Image (cartoon, rainbow, N blue to C red):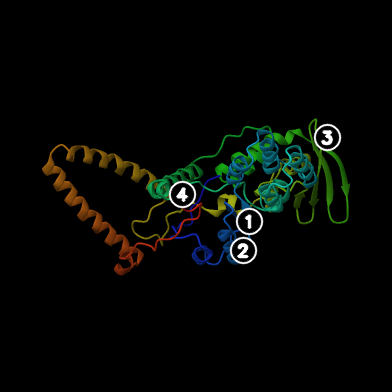
């Protein structure tokens, strides 16, 4: 999966009011489109702001912070192994309850405040309890402090944009090589999914040969398939509504991750289907979501497809490297080239502003130092004699 940055902000404090303002500003920028899920580090002010601005979003606690806190608060290797299983494991609710209860009892942590608090919040972090809620595989937040953010954000943003251009180029000028024996459905997936998502689907498709249909049952509304993996006792229920061509599975992988699970794909193969039903293809993973721009009569002068931009960008970088190398040999050349570059840079900025219809005043914004805010943390230490 590729990370897409829609926006970022640096706040002067971590108050509830600041977070509410930030999330409402984000919501306005996204034209009222609310996220389906939110992952945070568990900050109470942020949690409260999310519930106010995004009341329908599923809230998940960052797994990295949970594991770190478990190490700091408890720190027992035996407990941590079972805690990791409760956090990440593919468990049913009753399995989670059994493992959690035994783990807490084995280490005599029934009265541990952090353990009690985490159990009360289990619906925000346990895979067993958040199954069926869409998080697209996201389990943790980025771990950056302010200095790292300022130093690396612009560089990383440019890196992600370039990586997106490379992905668009590959999408426009190439198709993945078929690797499985299920060529028809694999080729169909290659035509509808983006390259990164297709790779994930192909891994699922490779496992589909391990799925066996134990039994089938036809009802008035759908066909029920009981399926199991090769040499596994556990079974799953897959339903297929023929009229609407809709599938669902008791594992709820589709609802959680947004891709058909191996049980569904196994049933597709069992039914000799050569295409993937529309209901199993999310728009966010589909090629049609972002088609490459094609030249047309309405294209503005100078507007070019992303692939051409990438080629021009690489060629310009080569020219600039040579220019820098030559101009730094003598000081007078350095001053001359730097002066001319400053003029050209300002000229291009003016041209871009005119083409985009941005007024000159909009580019001149005064940013003052924020008010000093008290950090969240342990505060000052009290020195005692």
* Quarter containing the N terminus: top right
* Residue under label 2: 51
Looking at the image, is mark 2 or mark 4 earlier in the sequence?
2
- Disc ID at residue 59: 1
261 up-or-down from 44: above or below: above
Q: CA distance from mark 1 to mark 3?
A: 33 Å
Q: CA distance from mark 4 to mark 3?
A: 62 Å
Q: Residue furthest top?
A: 231
In percent of width and height, residue 248 lies at 76, 50
* Residue under label 4: 383
* Residue under label 3: 233
Q: In this rendering, would 206 be left or right of 306?
A: right
Q: CA distance from mark 2 to mark 4?
A: 40 Å
Q: Residues within 10 Å of mark 4 (few under 14, many from 20)?
A: few
Name the one closer to the observer, 89 or 3: 89
In percent of width and height, residue 52 lies at 60, 66
Q: Secondary structure at mark 3?
A: loop
Q: Residues within 10 Å of mark 1 (few under 14, many from 20)?
A: many
Looking at the image, is mark 4 or mark 1 earlier in the sequence?
1
Q: CA distance from mark 2 to mark 3?
A: 41 Å
């Amino acid at each position: 999966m590729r990370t897409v940055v829609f926006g970022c902000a640096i706040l002067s404090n971590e108050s509830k009011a600041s977070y509410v303002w930030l999330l409402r500003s984000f919501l306005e920028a996204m034209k009222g489109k609310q996220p389906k899920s939110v992952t945070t580090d568990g900050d109470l002010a942020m949690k409260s702001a999310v519930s106010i601005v995004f009341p329908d979003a599923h809230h998940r606690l960052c797994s990295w912070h949970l594991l770190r806190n478990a190490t700091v608060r408890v720190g027992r290797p035996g407990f941590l192994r079972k805690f990791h299983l409760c956090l990440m494991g593919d468990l049913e609710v009753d399995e989670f309850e059994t493992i959690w209860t035994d783990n807490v009892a084995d280490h005599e942590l029934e009265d541990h405040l952090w353990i009690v608090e985490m159990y009360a919040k289990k619906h925000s972090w346990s895979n067993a309890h958040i199954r069926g809620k869409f998080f697209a595989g996201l389990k943790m937040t980025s771990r950056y402090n302010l200095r790292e953010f300022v130093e690396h954000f612009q560089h990383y943003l440019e890196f992600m944009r370039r990586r997106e251009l490379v992905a668009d180029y590959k999408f426009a000028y190439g198709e993945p090589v078929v690797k499985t024996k299920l060529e028809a459905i694999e080729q169909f997936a290659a035509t509808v999914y983006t390259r990164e998502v297709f790779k994930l689907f192909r891994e699922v498709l490779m496992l589909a040969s391990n799925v066996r249909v134990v039994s089938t049952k036809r009802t008035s509304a759908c066909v029920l398939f009981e399926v199991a993996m090769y040499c596994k006792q556990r079974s799953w229920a897959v339903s297929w509504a023929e009229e609407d061509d809709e599938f669902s599975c008791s594992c709820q992988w589709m609802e959680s991750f947004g891709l058909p699970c191996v049980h569904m794909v196994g049933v597709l193969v069992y039914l000799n289907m050569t295409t993937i039903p529309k209901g199993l293809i999310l728009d966010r993973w589909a090629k049609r979501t972002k088609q490459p721009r094609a030249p047309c009569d309405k294209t503005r002068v100078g507007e070019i497809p992303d692939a051409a931009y990438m080629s021009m960008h690489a060629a310009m970088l080569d020219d600039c490297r040579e220019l820098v190398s030559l101009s730094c040999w003598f000081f007078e050349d350095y001053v001359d080239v730097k002066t001319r570059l400053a003029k050209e840079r300002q000229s291009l900025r003016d041209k871009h502003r005119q083409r985009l219809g941005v007024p000159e005043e909009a580019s001149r914004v005064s940013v003052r130092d924020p008010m000093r805010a008290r950090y969240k943390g342990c505060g000052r230490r009290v020195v005692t004699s």
